[in-house]
Amino acid sequence: MTPGLVDALHRTLWWADHAVLGYFLVINTFYALLLILSIPELWEHWRLADNEHLQRLLASDALPPLTIMVPAHNEEVTIASSLLSFLTLEYPHFEVVLVNDGSKDATLSVLVREFDLYQVPAPYPTLIPTKRVFGVYRSRKHARLVVIDKENGGKADSLNAALNAARFEYVLAVDADTLIEPDALLRLARPFLLGTHVAAVGGTVRVANACRIELGRVVDAKVDRRWLPGCQVVEYLRAFLFGRLGWNRLGGSLIISGAFGMFRREYLLAIEGYRTGNVTEDMDLVVRLHRYLYEHDIHAKMPFIPDPVAWTEVPTTVKVLHRQRERWHRGLLSTVITHRGLLFNPKYGKVGMVSFPFFVFGELLAPVVELFGYLFTALGLWLHAVDWHFALLFFLVAVGYGSLLSVWAVVLEDVSFRKYRSRWDFLRLLAFSIIEGLGFRQMTVWFRLHAFWKYFRGHEGWGTMTREGFGPARVKP
């Protein structure tokens, strides 16, 4: 190359490297802001949770009745434990509607055997079209349980079937591989009793792997010693404990976890339920709900509260983790493209001007920018366009800053809820905070990049999510 071309390449790499460095600095500083904003939110929730009058109110008939909606597909390993945990929750008025979405394994047989099911006529109208329903079952052991057996249509279609069958004003969407703490519903219902109009509320999801579980309950929280689930424990702490909590003060998050979120049923029916064909139906639903509220001038909040806790099993192999993270990012891409009209649209308030832009530039494009950042820095070093001081600075901002935030999330967990009582678990979390930034994160960057390839090829599948299970469950009559 001529000296002029070499000089131009050096300048291009220099500017590209500094642009990526600036991107990481802005994004990680925004995450730090979320952490700071989460602290007064935590204090407020502690104050409310400790209020004696509220405790009496939570134990009264003022609590709204609700329907727990459970989609299940090929869940024979965990279904008995999970369903048992749902049926024995501390809440005065609720029902459980479980939808068997065309399972190919023994899910329905396990349900019939463990819960003594018998078939009944379908007693509800079809408000939202779904795949064909084969049968509706009740339980001789649990009057609160309804099981719907239907043709396979995906998770969104199953939730719509449960939404049709729901009898109560509020519905709680949970995954079949989720274990809910006994008082979680009492805590989750708290925002509905505080005088503000609430359209939905999300709670915390934690990692159940390696925890001791008895009769559908986590009785001893432990951090898995294996690096893959261990890093995910840190991820979940960072995402829920200060990520989503901090969004309460910035206009609300665009995600209420499909594993644990409560909604006002009338609003879900107004937006025609869950949209099929999207592999992250939870985010798509929340975005459409935000749009509906703004477009109809309905002043209703969708807060996140930290103390209601559900536990879920996370992938333990790289192959399954790849499928999960690729699907999550593909769903994010689909949702962003579908609802691109929200981007920097003042009509949608803070959602259009803050939340949606962040998810586009800070979440969707992050793996692309990170990949180019690594490539540009390596190429810049090789061609002497940047020096080792810049490379070290890039590493500290891109990786070290994020690891520091993970450490703070672990410390915040330890001084607040302290679910993990062992000092060894605390030390493991600190170690996984470093490991997560020095290998796990780069691996998931590749998984998320794969989502772009699959999306533009029209791939809509979920992939098989194998599970280890929670261990044997015994169903009480």
Image: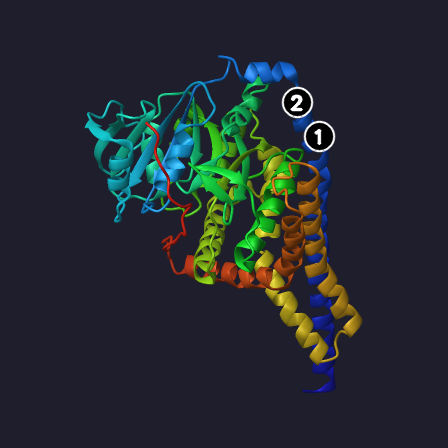
| Image quadrant containing the N terminus | bottom right
**Disc 2 marks which amino acid?**
Asp
Q: Is residue 145 above or below residue 443?
A: above
Q: Position of residue 161 (x, y in %)?
A: 31, 33
Q: Is residue 64 above or below residue 280?
A: above
Q: Is residue 89 above or below residue 31?
A: above
> Residue lying farthest bottom?
2
Q: Position of residue 282 (x, y in %)?
A: 46, 40
**Disc 1 marks which amino acid?**
Trp
Q: Residue at x 56, y 30 (%)?
A: 302
SS class of the residue under badge 2?
A: loop
Residue hosting label 1 = 43
Q: Residue at x 56, y 43 (%)?
A: 221
Q: Position of residue 318 (x, y in %)?
A: 47, 62
Mark 2–mark 1 Cα distance, whole angstroms, equals: 11 Å
Contact (Cβ within 8 Å) of mark 2 with mark 1? no
User: Viewer-nearest of labels 2 and 1?
Assistant: 2
Residue 109 - label: none
The image quadrant of residue 433 is: bottom right
SS class of the residue under badge 1?
A: helix
Sequence-wise first label, 2 or 1: 1
Residue 50 - label: 2
Position of 142 compared to 119: left or right? right
Position of 173 compared to 441: left or right? left
Few, some or many residues within 10 Å of mark 2 (<14, 14–19, 20+): few
